[in-house]
Image (cartoon, helix red, strand yellow):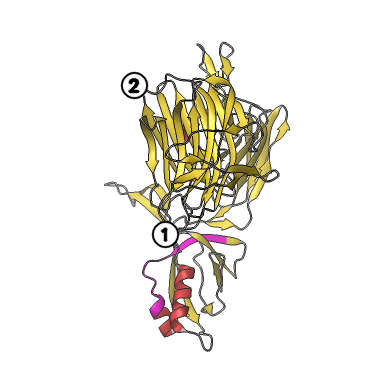
Amino acid sequence: SFTFNNQRKKFIQIEKGWKRPTWAPLKRNLLQVPNYPGARLLSTETDIRVLNIPVGIIVPNGSNLEKLKEEIADWLITEHPVELIFDAEPDRIYMAVVDESFDPDEFVTLGQGVIKFICPMPYKLSKDKKKYTMINQNSTLKADVENKGTVEGIPTITLTAARESTFFDLDTDDGQFFRIGYPATVEEKPFIREELIADLPMTTIGWTTANYVDYGNVAGSFENLGEGPLQAADYGTGTGWHGPALKRSLKVPIQNFRVEVDLDFQMTSYEIGRMEVYLLDEASEIIGKIAIWRNQLGTSYTWVDIHGGNKNNMVQIIGSHGTYENTWDLFSGVLRIVRVNQRWEAYIASVDEKGKHDSAMFRVFNDIENRFNQSKLAQIVIHSATFGDIGTKRQSFNQLRVWRYNNPADFNVPYIIVPGDKIEIDCEKSDIRVNGESRLFLKDFSSDFLRLQKGKTKVSAYPRDIGKVDVEFRERYR
């Protein structure tokens, strides 16, 4: 039989005698020329792989046929290609989707049929990934990579940075080259463009009680459970929005800044809540805000508001529920606000257990009238609330950091990598992620994502002391 989407069904078996296609179909592009015998071969393309699998179904005694149809449909119909593994070839993986013509009714009624799988990526994959960690060889950081597949491999290169750098280069002994950033010349001086000036502790120590929040009352208190996040111990009482709020001053006021909060905002459809981060100037006036809330019972609707200014004079940079009303339901992720001179930026993204950003939204506002860049950021307020006596669930502040943007002098080149950064270069998806966030704009567009040809390839990284570099890929077969 076979395993699809990490599941197998004992009541489905492949008919004897079926043979899988030996290789993915090829398409030869030919050019016929007058007075030339035959044709000239211009190129060869690999087409999608189609697997028509004749199967029989053994319906278990006492089974409900309708429920069986639902089970089969739920198993086979997927939105994206997933793993397909045949028992006869357990060390090879096909990435497949079932064809749209699949009919579970006919399949169960007749007890046999053909399942048509389509593999948009036509090659078979090795079951296990190969991983190489670069080592210092002759003053160069490199790895000797071997691809035993029958076609080129597409790697993911992961850098865990040990020091700052203005660039990161990769090259191979067959002439390929990839770069992010820009190496400084001897006349240029690298500088820290984004300087972390505050990683605010998620405890109540060092914070004071704030005396104002928009459209609500300050009540209740926060608590920190050991090394865990900061969350409300109680929300107090009130008929409108009410909950605790804490304030903290930065060591120095800053003009150009980035404020980023990592939080969990998770509740059922019958709970109400809001979480807010206020940006205050030296006079305790609000100059910006990050907020996420739910104010509708019985839905998964979650709204995000990131704006510059205050409620009486503001510009909303992000005001959205995302692509769908439930895009940020059960939210765990980051929200960010940035001001650099006249440019404001807002960003939100869910973050999965591997640190990858998803369901992201990014917006920009250029304050050409200089309405919202007159005051410096000097204080931060965090606030968590519920409405009336309606219950709320998990609202926790996990991390809150503030960066200062430094202005470059002439001939300065900014660091794009700092110690601790994790940079993933996904050559298959043509993407670059820095700490889980897509940063494709860092790529030098005169360079290319790498491919690993059949056989042995030397892959080198620069600077040689940049940190730990891993090369990971699956071998692919026709």
**Left or right position of 209 against 375:** right
Residue, far left: 34
Report the quarter where the N terminus lies. Answer: bottom right
Tell me which label, 2 or 1, sits earlier in the chain: 1
Residues drawn in magenta: 93-105
- Around disc 2, counting alpha carbons within 10 Å, would you say few (fewer than 14), some (14 to 19), or many (20 or more)? few
Q: Nearer the viewer, mark 2 or mark 1?
A: 1
Secondary-structure class at tag 1:
loop
Residue 349 magenta: no
* Residue at the outermost bottom position: 61
Horizontal relation, residue 203 to residue 446: left or right: right
Q: Mark 2 falls on what kind of element?
A: loop
Specify few, some or many for label 1: CA neighbours under 10 Å numbering under 14, 14-19, or 20 or more: few
Q: Is residue 431 visible?
A: no
Which residue lies under the disc numbered 2? 368
Measure the alpha-carbon separation of dots 2 and 1. Answer: 42 Å
Of residue 345 and residue 151, the one placed in the foreground of this image is 345
Asked whether 95 falls inside the magenta stretch, the response is yes
Please tell me which residue lies in front, 378 or 351.
378
Residue at x-position 64% and y-position 55%: 128
Q: Is residue 394 above or below residue 198?
A: below
Image-based side of 97 in relation to 159, left or right: left
**What x and y, as percent, mark residue 471?**
63, 42
Q: Residue 244 placed where, x, y %?
A: 55, 41
Circle 2: residue type: Ile
Q: Amino acid at mark 1?
A: Gly
As drawn, the label of residue 298 is 1
Instruction: Give percent across and percent down for residue 287.
Output: 44, 27
Marker disc for residue 43: none
How far across and down, in percent of the image, does residue 426 sit? Answer: 53, 42
Rendered residue at 49%/81% (across/down) = 56
Residue most extreme to the front: 238
